[in-house]
Amino acid sequence: MNQIRAIQALNKKEIENGISPEASWHRDYRNTAFVYFGGLPYELSEGDIITIFSQFGEPTFLKLVRDKETGKSKGFGWLKYEDQRSTDLAVDNLGGAEIQGRLVRVDHAEYKARDDEDQGEFKVGWEDIMKKEGHDLEEDAPSSEEEERRPALPEERELALLMRDHDDDDPMKPFLIEEKKKEVASRWGRSPKKIATG
């Protein structure tokens, strides 16, 4: 709780003093795209955590610490974003948030893998999540014949335009793309990675 308050106090002080992003305390963490999170409800899955954190960018790595014997979540871990700027947004907006009655701690972090750790195990992508949740991606994917026969949905056209025309410097671009992929996927009931964008 004290660390949450300390981060909130730093942010408040920067706002009051009109500190520029170049002089922000976040600048000390420009070399890492990792955040540490703690205090999450134990029943949240990796998919739930990705959904929460993807509001601020595209996660590429997630390690949720679990009990070795029971496999149950301990409510803390590390997450890496594709774009380091997303860490600033997550720290500022999720730190101190309440999820299912629990205060969440989010802070910048340096993450060093253990020697016996397989980094591929913690890689994050929609295909990885869908596989972990038991979806058969080959079975869910439409045939190329089906893709060619049907006209593009409005959401698919919007996704293609978003991917092509949206400012690449906007840290929200990956999030907006993922959200649009989810919209298209919900219309067709399949994995967002398998969606045609042209």
Image (cartoon, helix red, strand yellow):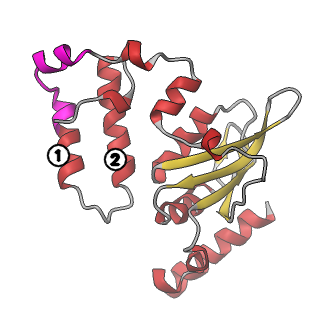
* The magenta stretch spans residue 153: yes
Q: Quadrant of the C terminus?
A: top left
Is the magenta region chiefly helix, strand or loop? helix
Placement of 91 over or under 162, stated as above or below:
below
Residue at left 54%, top 81%? 24
Q: Which residue is mark 1?
A: 161
Amino acid type of the residue that numbered disc 2 sits on in the rendered structure: Leu
Q: Which residue is mark 2?
A: 176
Question: Dot 2: within a 10 Å radius of its alpha carbon, few (fewer than 14), some, or many (20 or more) residues?
Answer: many
Closer to us: 63 or 144: 144
Query: Which region is colored magenta?
Result: 143-157
Residue 43 occupies which quadrant of the picture? top right
Placement of 193 over or under 12, stated as above or below:
above
> Residue 67 location in percent, x, y?
85, 35
Closer to us: 100 or 174: 174
Q: Are marks 2 and 1 in contact (CB under 8 Å)?
A: no
> Residue 37 location in percent, x, y?
69, 52
Q: CA distance from mark 2 to mark 1?
A: 12 Å
Q: Left or right: where does residue 135 sit relative to residue 105?
A: left
> Residue 80 location in percent, x, y?
57, 54
Q: Earlier in the sequence, mark 2 or mark 1?
A: 1
Helix, strand or loop at disc 1? helix
Residue at left 61%, top 79%? 28
Q: Left or right: where does residue 133 sit relative to residue 66?
A: left
Residue at left 86%, top 26%? 70
Amino acid type of the residue that numbered disc 1 sits on in the rendered structure: Leu
Residue 178 occupies which quadrant of the picture? top left
